[in-house]
Amino acid sequence: MRLRQRREEIGLTAVAAGRAVGIIQAYVSGVEAGRVKLPAHRLAQLVEVYELEADDAAELEKLRVGATRRGWWHDYSQLFPAEFLRFLGYESGADHIRCYSTEVVPGLLQTEEYARAVIRGGTTVIRLTEVERRVAARMARRARLDTDPAIRITAVLSEGVLRQQVGGPTVMREQLDYLARLISERPKQIQVRIMPFSAGAHPALGGPFQVLSFPSPRLTDLVWQEILTSIDIIDQSVRVTDYAVTFAETLERTLSSGDSLALIRQIAKEMT
């Protein structure tokens, strides 16, 4: 992303950049999309062509070296498509996630039994033999809640998320109790706001999404969107801004933090 931004700043096309260092346009595009690994000598060539400062070059080299290390999610590469593995990498490096969900509790906030119920019942394309490995992967994601620095989460959940009895009432009550504990014990890290049915139409009505932000101010936000038939990482600044603004406006129409927690606890008690 940084290389693409710099190339565009100096007015170079991907074709021209590739020609300057002796590589094809597809290679440049692959690097910029995160699909192709960049060796040190190629990065040095691009740094020279792009006229980057020494500090920028050093930071990019650090990022390049980091990208060569295998993350925990690579152990599950046979289970998930490449785009989802990229998302897991971004999620692992993010410091704040803003998410809107219409039907299920976000993955980072799920209990093991709830996750198992979602995975077993959520799609017809998952083999039964894959279920436990997928559950393990989802629990591994949850480690980001406890790493230092821990990831922050701001979640807007439709009231339907609380009432959809995923796994049955016992599993659902355990999930809602867990959610309430997280909110109560980690108020600075985890904020969950409920969009009640009574709110009617609102800006995010239509589908779930996540906006991921990163520790470095030089790394722009990303949007992750997952629906029944497709998954997508969105990094175009205009589209990302649209999602961020939509989330902010939606958040304003939710119940307060206190009222949201009270509703979660109330519905949990109803799960008998």
Image (cartoon, helix red, strand yellow):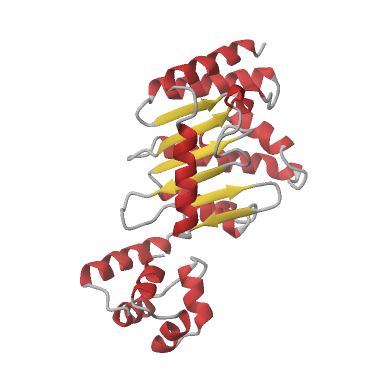
What is the x, y in percent for residue 5?
A: 38, 68
- Relative height, residue 115 to residue 84 (above, below): above
- Say which quadrant the N terminus sits in: bottom left
Give me the residue at 47% from left, 84% from top: 15
Mark count: 0
Q: Is residue 226 left or right of residue 210?
A: right
Give me the residue at 38% from left, 75% from top: 7
What is the x, y in percent for residue 121?
A: 73, 35
Q: Is residue 248 visible?
A: yes
- Say which quadrant the C terminus sits in: top right
What is the x, y in percent for residue 270?
A: 64, 11
**Along the viewing direction, whichever of 85 and 154 lies nearer the viewer:** 154
Give me the residue at 33% from left, 77% from top: 10
Residue found at the far left of this picture: 54
- Relative height, residue 229 to residue 198 (above, below): below
Give me the residue at 51% from left, 72% from top: 30
What is the x, y in percent for residue 127?
A: 75, 46
Q: Is residue 54 left or right of residue 88?
A: left
